[in-house]
């Protein structure tokens, strides 16, 4: 059977000026030199304006890759202040985060728009890292599952099987992002298994089993291994703990 990659993503959000970003990337690259296990990929998502400079630090063939935190839904045009997928490709990005809860919440990005962003990313050769996750901790499992299923169906299920096979899914319960609270690893595993089941129902087992599903939300050096050892948890999307090289590298190394 096809073995899917293990992936750890660093979402720097709106942190680090250029000098700080270059220092952090350099430290991570040096600390991970020859230390990344087979089938593990590391993806750094710095602010847009650091992409080109950081891409020059990365060895051409290696386990560390670059991505952007967002892209516009059109390839070009009169959209002042926006960044398009082909521009991101041209400065060294190969991945793009789409549907992060902060984009949904602060910038009003909804399912239809996110579906467009996923499509344009794929057209221009960027692998989407698509975020989903329920907003409330207190709702029932059935409610959480319906919520996540709706997010997947409305933003991903227009894709062909070949296209969705390029997507990485990140399950990020919104209540866990930046709060220090997390689901238990057993609860996270159950949701990852459900996500894989929903994808399998639409695209079949083979496609579903090839898609990496990452956990995100207060994942840190203490709890990463507990999540990563679950069978449907293929790695993590890391916010706060990715801003310190030591912590991020420890999390990467906790992937089996
Ligand atoms: C995130 O913003 O995607 C995230 C997981 O943040 P944190 O790790 O800080 O909860």
Image (cartoon, grey):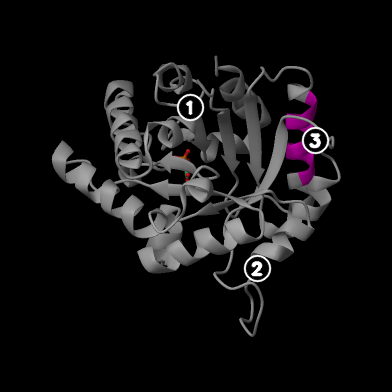
Q: Nearer the viewer, mark 1 or mark 3?
A: 1
Element under disc 1: loop
Q: Along the horizontal axis of the image, is 7 left or right of 156?
A: right
Name which residue lies at 71% across and 51% down. Answer: 93
Residue 139 can be seen in this image: no
Q: Residue at x 44, y 62 (%)?
A: 115
Q: Position of residue 232 (x, y in %)?
A: 39, 25
**Are discs 1 and 3 less than 8 Å apart at CB?**
no
Which picture quadrant has residue 201? top left
Q: Main secondary structure of the magenta part?
A: helix
Q: Is residue 103 above or below residue 60?
A: below
Q: Which residue is mark 3?
A: 26
Residue name at image x 80 percent, y 46 percent: 55
- Write the residue at 75% across / 23% down: 31
Q: Position of residue 218 (x, y in %)?
A: 42, 34
Secondary structure at numbered mark 2: loop
Q: Secondary structure at mark 3?
A: helix
Relative to 119, residue 176 above or below? above
User: How many residues crowd mark 3 within 10 Å: few (<14), some (14–19), many (20+)?
Assistant: some
Does 26 lie within the magenta span? yes
Q: Is mark 2 within 8 Å of ligand 1?
A: no
Q: Quick one: label 1 or label 2, which is nearer the N terminus?
A: 2
Which label sits in the foreground, 2 or 3? 2
Spatial separation of the CA atoms under disc 1 and disc 3:
25 Å
Which percent across, then down, holds residue 113?
Answer: 43, 68
Q: Which residue is mark 1?
A: 234
Q: Is residue 205 left or right of residue 148?
A: right
Q: Magenta stretch?
A: 22-30
Which residue lies under the disc numbered 2? 84
Instruction: For the C terminus, give its image quadrant.
Output: top right
């Amino acid at each position: 059977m096809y073995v899917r990659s293990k992936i750890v993503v660093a979402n720097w959000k709106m942190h680090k000026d250029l000098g700080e970003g270059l220092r952090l990337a350099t430290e991570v690259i040096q600390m991970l030199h020859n230390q990344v296990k087979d089938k593990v990929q590391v993806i750094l998502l710095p602010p847009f304006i650091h992409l080109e400079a950081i891409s020059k630090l990365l060895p051409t063939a290696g386990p560390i890759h670059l991505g952007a935190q967002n892209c516009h839904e059109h390839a070009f045009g009169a959209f002042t202040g926006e960044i398009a997928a082909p521009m991101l490709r041209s400065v060294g990005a190969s991945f793009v985060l789409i549907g992060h809860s902060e984009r949904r919440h602060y910038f009003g990005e909804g399912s239809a728009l996110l579906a467009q962003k996923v499509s344009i990313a794929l057209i221009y050769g960027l692998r989407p890292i698509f975020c989903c996750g329920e907003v409330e901790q207190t709702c029932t499992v059935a409610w959480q599952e319906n919520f996540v299923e709706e997010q997947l169906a409305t933003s991903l299920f227009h894709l062909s099987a070949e296209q969705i096979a390029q997507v990485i899914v990140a399950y990020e319960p919104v209540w866990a992002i930046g709060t220090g609270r997390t689901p238990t690893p057993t609860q996270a595993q159950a949701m990852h298994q459900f996500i894989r089941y929903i994808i399998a129902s639409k695209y079949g087992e083979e496609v579903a089993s090839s898609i990496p599903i990452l956990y995100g939300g207060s994942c840190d050096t203490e709890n990463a291994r507990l999540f990563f050892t679950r069978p449907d948890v293929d790695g993590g999307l890391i916010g706060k703990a990715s801003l310190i090289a030591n912590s991020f590298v420890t999390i990467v190394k906790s992937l089996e």
